[in-house]
Image: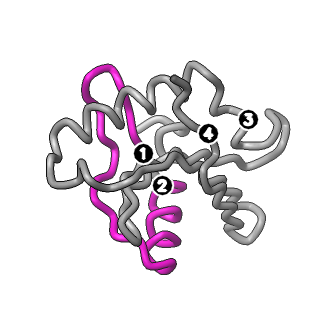
Amino acid sequence: MSNEKAKGTFGEALAADFLEKEGYTILKKNYLKYGGELDIVAFKNGVVVFIEVKTRYSYLMGEPAAAVDTFKQLKIIKGAEGFMSENEKLHSCSFRFDVIEVMPKESKRINHIINAFEVEE
């Protein structure tokens, strides 16, 4: 496993633990279909939450959430569309897109950005 992949896997595990402690139910991790990708799909209070996890060990590349650019958002949206098409029981639920920033060197700091971006019509 590459160093970047290991870092991402570690950050996603920390994010999933954080979400569960916050009362979220994890529905899926690492969903890759239909040209889209989702790190974590969770559910809480009738809302399906598609979560992108960004792990950084320093700020040399900027804030972690800054890496979720328009191109990345489109891949997440595409993944969300695929996930929802496979899960008809969730069609009546609302949804949103969150980003979780993980900074392991800062005492495993986690910053949960709720509704980080929206689908533009």
Residue 38, percent from left and from top = 39, 40
Q: Which stretch did the figure color magenta?
A: 10-39
Residue linked to disc 1 = 39
Residue 116 part of the magenta-drawn span: no
Q: Does the magenta stretch include residue 32?
A: yes
Proximity of marks 3 and 1: CB atoms separated by less than 8 Å: no
Q: In this view, does 22 lie above or below 64?
A: below
Assess whether mark 2 and mark 1 are in contact (beta carbons under 8 angstroms): yes
Q: Closer to the camera: disc 3 or disc 4?
A: 4
Q: Which amino acid does label 4 sit on?
A: Phe
**Residue at (55, 26) in percent of width and height:** 120
In the drawing, what numbered circle is on residue 12? 2
Taking the spot 49% from the left edge, 23% from the top edge, the residue there is 74
Question: Residue at point 47% right, 35% down?
Answer: 2
Instruction: Please report whichever mark, 2 or 3, sits nearer to the chain's N-terminal start.
Output: 2
Helix, strand or loop under label 3:
helix
The amino acid pointed to by label 3 is Ala
Label 4 SS: strand
Of the two numbered discs 1 and 4 in the rendering, the one whose residue sits closer to the viewer: 4
Looking at the picture, does residue 120 appear above or below residue 95?
Answer: above
Give the number of the disc on residue 66: 3
**Gap between marks 4 and 2, in whole Å?**
19 Å
Distance from Cα at disc 3 to Cα at disc 1: 16 Å
| Residue closer to the observer: 51 or 14 | 51
- Report which residue position mark 4 lands on: 117
Between 101 and 42, the one lying in front of the other is: 42
Residue 10 x, y percent position in the rendering = 50, 56
Q: Which numbered disc, 3 or 1, marks the residue that appears first in the sequence?
A: 1
Earlier sequence position, callout 3 versus callout 4: 3
